[in-house]
Image (tube, helix red, strand yellow):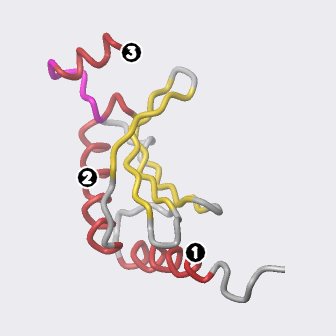
Amino acid sequence: MNAPNAHAGWFRDVRRILDIIEVTPGLPLPSICKDRAVFFFVGAAHAEDAREAIRLAEIILQGALLTVFYPRRTQAGSTRHYILTAVLPSGLMVDLVALAEHIDGQDTPAGRELARAA
């Protein structure tokens, strides 16, 4: 059997996240599991909207959770994702997920170079 407060930190961090999204218009409800809370921004129709949404979510959550997000990229089949990840005190990870093509922007020289490399 688990110790009485074995998961207290996890519950505290999840409650903090839920409290933040409850009072912050525009933040989506995250998918929460045992090791992470994931905010998906992959449904944005326009790259500019996706960039703005993930940037604002990062600013809001970084300030409210007193943490720092670090970027990474993943590949799922033919879809590349741009993910910002932060780790909370309990070990719970918070991911902000967007399509890499929306973040990289293929209309810039760097974006075109990244697209060619992929």
Q: Residue at x 33, y 49 (%)?
A: 70
* Residue type at the position of mark 3: Ala
Q: Tag on residue 10?
A: 1
Q: Is residue 100 left or right of residue 14?
A: left
Up-down relation of residue 86 to residue 40 (above or below): below
Q: Which residue is mark 2?
A: 55
Q: Position of residue 6 (x, y in %)?
A: 67, 80
Q: Nearer the viewer, mark 2 or mark 1?
A: 1
Q: Position of residue 113 (x, y in %)?
A: 24, 15
The residue carrying pointer 2 sits among few (fewer than 14), some (14 to 19) or many (20 or more) residues within 10 Å by Cα, namely few
Magenta extent: 103-109
Instruction: State which tag comes first along the sequence, 2 or 1.
Output: 1
Cβ–Cβ under 8 Å for marks 2 and 3:
no
| Tag 2: amino acid | Arg
Q: Which residue is mark 3?
A: 118
Image coords of residue 117 (percent x, y): 33, 13
Q: Residue at x 26, y 71 (%)?
A: 63
